[in-house]
Image (cartoon, rainbow, N blue to C red):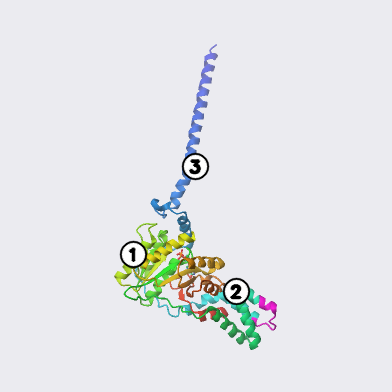
Amino acid sequence: MAAGPCGVCETVTLMAYVILIVIIAVVALSGGGWLLFLRPRRGRSVTAPSGPPAAVSGTSAAASGEDAADQAGGKPAPATGVLEAERPPPSAGRMVRLRARLARSQGSVGTALLNLLSRDRLDDETWDEIEEVLITADVGVGPARAMVDDLRTKVKVLGVRGTDEVRGLLRAELLTQLGDEDRSLRTTPHGGVPAVVLMVGVNGTGKTTTCGKLARALIGDGETVLLGAADTFRAAAADQLQTWGERVGAKTVRADRDGADPASVAFEAVTEGIETGVDAVIIDTAGRLHTKVGLMDELGKVKRVVEKKAPVDEVLLVLDATTGQNGLRQARVFAEVVDVTGIVLTKLDGTAKGGIVIAVQREIGVPVKLVGLGEGPDDLAPFDPAVFVDAILG
Ligand code: GDP
């Protein structure tokens, strides 16, 4: 029976095939497993080419989140070549020139208020509506109520009725609420040292952009400026600041590595500012949303260390006008940890809630000194209450 041994051969061959197929399958699966395992790592290395170096990349979870915010914020790319310094226009009359930006966003509030105040009958319901318009514009509940009480009394006592009279009344009331504080910026050298400006605020509010715009404005006014990139947690922030500086011929002092001590960068900047005899040193700081104690330690140290060299003349708190109550909460925290001397309200071009100017001054007790009215290099203006109110009222 020749078929016997041949059958055995076939069985053995078949089994060999099966074993071979099983081996191939196992190898293929494990290989696939490696591929699956490797794919995400490959992905990470591709998406993070500009991240901080490995030595510091793991030191702060917040830093990576901020990098993402940077990308969302559309920072200018770092300088790639030698830029010829521009001669920026002087800052005088900026707010008048940028008034159209305000009118676009704030006009609706003014129109609503004027319409309500011009009604034939100013009953309780109308006054409630007026209060509501003010609250919706972020004036704050307390100030809105105070304004309504004031206006009510004046309308009753003076019997104001005509359109021009109503407008005049509202204008005077808004100006009263804005106050007549000293809004000047201390940016001129004194006692043989430059003026030192510390820019503080939460990331994303427009802090670095404001440092750049302010440097431009001062240079346009004939001053010399040095920038200090003390936001050492984000390489992009220092690049961004340096680009602003290169455009207008202001040197930027920055750390040679990410995560360096912000206070030492600030110190270096002021030291160099003194040595080179510039008029003003503007220092950008990190605004990570972490604990109040952490913030206090960080900003407190920057200020203390700088003051070994020169007094800090301005601590400007940068707030995003579009963030409403959230922005006010941030302002409160910052005001508790540093002596804020002025507020910079950015993105006022992008919101109808200009009432935040009144609310934040009341809350923090310091004046709004500058306003940001766009992303352009010259879209920063000294705050002028009369221009602001006229833009509201149209
Ligand atoms: P930082 O993280 O606080 O330093 O914020 P940046 O300076 O990077 O600004 C965040 C974003 O806000 C950027 O896209 C800026 O161009 C934008 N920005 C800053 N100021 C203004 C402003 O006044 N108006 C508008 N519309 N955008 C602004």
Span shown in magenta: 117-128
In percent of width and height, residue 177 lies at 55, 79
Does the closest atom of ligand 1 sit within 8 Å of the Cβ of label 1? no
Residue 41 visible to the viewer:
yes
In terms of secondary structure, where does tag 3 sit?
helix
Q: Residue 88's image quarter?
A: bottom left
Disc 1, SS: helix
- Identify the image quadrant of the C terminus: bottom right
Label whose residue precedes the other's in the sequence (2 or 1): 2
Q: Is residue 286 visible?
A: no
Whether residues under marks 1 and 3 lie with C-beta atoms below 8 angstroms apart, the answer is: no
Along the polypeptide, which appears first: circle 2 or circle 3? Answer: 3
**Type of the residue with mark 2:** Gly
Label 2 belongs to which residue? 142
Q: Which residue is mark 3?
A: 36
Residue picked out by circle 1: 268
Amino acid bearing label 3 = Leu
Task: Tell me which amino acid carries mark 1.
Answer: Glu
Quarter occupied by the N terminus: top right
Q: CA distance from mark 2 to mark 1?
A: 44 Å
Q: Position of residue 10 (x, y in %)?
A: 52, 20
298 vs 273, left or right, is: right
Query: Relative to residue 54, is residue 174 drawn left or right?
Result: right
Relative to residue 295, is residue 46 depicted above or below?
above
How many angstroms separate mark 1 from mark 3 (CA)?
48 Å
Return the x and y of residue 359 as percentages of the image width and height.
55, 73
